[in-house]
Amino acid sequence: MESAVGFILSRQLLARVGRSPTAARRSPRKHDDGDGDSSDAKAAVRIWTKAEEEEDRGRGRVQPFQDKKAPEGGGGGGGGDGGGDSEERHGRRRGEMKATLKGRFEGDKATAATTLAVPAAGDLRLKASATEAAFSNGPSLRGLTLTLEKPGAFLVDLKPHTKDVRFQFMNSALVLDKRVSLTYTHSTSLAPAAAPAAAPPSRTALDCAVTFGAANKVSFSHALGSGGCRVKYTYAHGADRLTTIEPVFDTNKNAWEFAVTKKFEGGVAVKGTYHASTKLLGLEWTRDSKSGGSFKIATSFDLSDQSKAPKLIAESTWNYEI
């Protein structure tokens, strides 16, 4: 009620002086007129400002009223807003730090892993991943992986315990209006060789993917020295691309693999796979949670030996922003 009365009084005073509070504050010639306009304008400014403050305070938006001074040079009134912007920017920076927890249950065996990702300079990100091996017998470097990455450009993985390093470089370009993506991966070990041994298998791989519109993609994977490659064709069916069919041919094994995925409302997806070389049939059910997590239940059947019991796997993944 008081704020409404103050607002009405301020309007009446402003109507009498015939100008806005800003004009009253910025016009120096009226200060020495002696006609009372200057004092009336100052009173109008104070009543009008205080009415706004009291109204906002009643809504819980501001602190108790304090006298406002006219900004000089545009810098006087920006202090409070600048602090709010700083807090918003700090909040966004804090939101960029993410943690992931993953639990996996397979038969009578349970495993867990956690990943912490923090922003670095520019677009770089640092990640630290650890499995339960890092904590099972006290803190250790076993099961720890450190990663430096720039999404879509490169990443470097280092396992301090085994001194294994993995380099990966990614790039993409438009070729004849088709998106072509290339990935180069090389893994090596920095640990000195204890004794001469046979040459390890090739750990350098090249991956290429060509996208033909929104529904078709062809991928090639080749490990240097293997003498073969894997060719995968991906087809997304329907206007909403809810059904995906992925046949794969492995030239090394001279065998086919098939995968069919169907997506449903609510973040639910069902996937079926079949590996002709091992005669393994797999079924998988996944669901994405609105709270930032996902659940997966998978089972596999060995069709070559039906006496074997099917394997059952359950996974739960949770993502958090710190």
Image: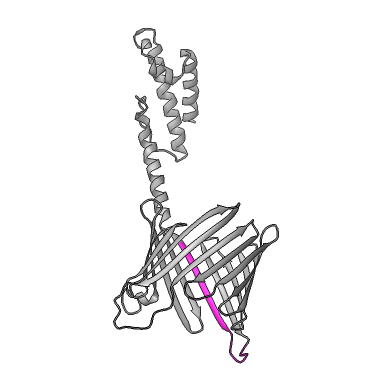
The image quarter in which residue 49 lies: top left
Q: Residue furthest right?
A: 238
The image quarter in which residue 303 lies: bottom right
Q: Position of residue 319 (x, y in %)?
A: 47, 63
Front in this rendered view, residue 139 or 28: 139
Is 309 covered by the magenta stretch? yes
Residue 228 appears in the picture as rendered:
yes
What residue is drawn where x is 57% and y is 75%? 297
Front in this rendered view, residue 147 or 50: 147
Position of residue 87 in the picture relative to residue 303 (left or right): left
What residue is drawn where x is 43% and y is 64%? 168
What is the basis of the colouring in this image?
A: one colour
Is 34 covered by the magenta stretch? no
What residue is drawn where x is 58% and y is 79%? 299
Q: Is residue 188 above or below residue 154?
A: below
Q: Is residue 257 above or below residue 234?
A: below
Q: Which residues are magenta?
A: 304-319
Residue 273 appears in the picture as rendered:
no
Q: Position of residue 187 (x, y in %)?
A: 40, 70
Q: Quadrant of the C terminus?
A: bottom left
What residue is drawn where x is 58% and y is 76%? 251
Q: Position of residue 247 (x, y in %)?
A: 64, 71
Q: Is residue 309 above or below residue 267?
A: below
Front in this rendered view, residue 254 or 160: 254
Q: Position of residue 231 (x, y in %)?
A: 59, 70
Q: Residue furthest bottom?
A: 307
